[in-house]
Each structure stands twice: as structure tokens, then as C-alpha cells.
Image (cartoon, rainbow, N blue to C red):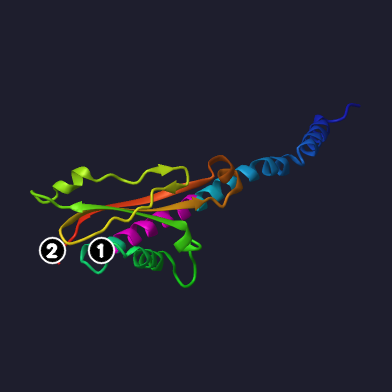
Amino acid sequence: MRKPRTMGARKRAARITRRERGASTLEFVLILPFFLLVVFMIIELGLVFVAQELLDNAARDGARLLRIGTLSGSSYSTALATAVCNDLTTTTFTLVPSCTQNIQIYVAATNSGNPAGSGFQSLKTATVSGQSMTQTKASVSANYDVVMQIGYAYPWTLPGISLLTGNTMLISTIAFQTEPY
């Protein structure tokens, strides 16, 4: 007498499931590094955007000090760097370690001229080369046209990105006219 076909099908099904026993683990092991890389890249890019936003806010606050005359003349360099660093650091966490050594500040200024604002035509922005930019601080007085830039060489924390790009230069630029103080 012949064996029923259902037994053969069961044996075949058991053999197939035995062969696929580690397949899901293998797929997980192959996909996990790429998944983690994407997750960490998203976190890293978020930190870069936060650092850029902090730099923009610090540049606006520093520009306000120059604009209203709190800082003026040619000896404001240290006070401006301190004010910018106070905006970039918090009590719990900082994205710009050793701020006064790591930020780069450029200020170009000229008399506003006639009509007001015509001084901007002669102003230039900082020259950036790799991880550094020109760091001059022009004398600032009332009714001056000013271009201020703050730069920071952002170090990537993911080893793969830093090997490819090194540090990335984040720059915030503000153009304004000082008040007639």
C-alpha cells in the first residue's frame, strides 16, 4: 500500500523551513549597519543645523552690539568674541567647545556715504580657505556700513563623514548700517 502524499509534503515543508532557519538573522545582520549609519547621519545633520542656527543668533546679537554703538572704534575685538561665545554656549551643553579659540570673526566697515548705504559697494566678505577665514576687524563708527561674518570649523563626530570631509566651515554673515549714535 502507498503512503499518503500528505506525509511527503510535510517532510518537504519541514526541510524547507530548516534551510531558512537563520535567514532572517542574516538579513538583520546585513541591514543593521546601513540602518544605523542612516540614523546617526540624521542625528549628525541635526546637530549641524543646530550649530548653524546658534551661530546665526550669535552673529545677530554681536551685530546689534556694533550697530547701536555698545561696541565701536577698533578695540572691540575681545568684547565681541566674548559676546558671541556667550550666545554659543549654554550651562548644560555646548556645540562649540573652546569657543574663543575656535570661532573666527571678520568685520569690514566703511563710511556709509551719500546716498546712505553706498559704502556697501566697496565692502568685501571674508576669504575662506579650507577650515579658516580672514579675521580682520575694521574700525566701526556711527553711520558706517558693516559686513560681519562669524565662522566655525564644525568637526563631524561620525568617523566616516570626517574622513571624507574633515571639518565643515559654518559661516554666518550679517550686513547692517550702524546707528547715528
Q: Could you tell me which quadrant the N terminus lies in?
A: top right
- Badge 1 marks a residue whose secondary structure is loop
Query: Spatial distance from mark 2 to mark 1, Cα to Cα?
Result: 14 Å
By secondary structure, the bulk of the magenta-drawn segment is best described as helix
Crowd class of label 1 (few under 14; some 14 to 19; many from 20; radius 10 Å)? some
Q: Position of residue 15 (x, y in %)?
A: 81, 35
Q: Give left or right: position of 135 versus 139.
A: right
Task: Identify whether 109 is placed above or below 163.
Answer: below
Q: In this picture, which residue range is highlighted in magenta?
A: 45-61
The amino acid type of the residue labelled 2 equals: Pro
Crowd class of label 2 (few under 14; some 14 to 19; many from 20; radius 10 Å)? few
Q: Which residue is mark 2?
A: 180
- Is residue 3 within the magenta segment? no
Q: Position of residue 169 (x, y in %)?
A: 44, 48
Q: Which residue lies most toward the left here?
A: 115
- Is residue 56 within the magenta segment? yes
Q: Could you tell me which quadrant the C terminus lies in?
A: bottom left
The numbered disc on residue 73 is: 1
Q: Which residue lies most toward the top here?
A: 2
Q: Nearer the viewer, residue 11 or 86?
A: 86
Q: Position of residue 180 (x, y in %)?
A: 13, 63
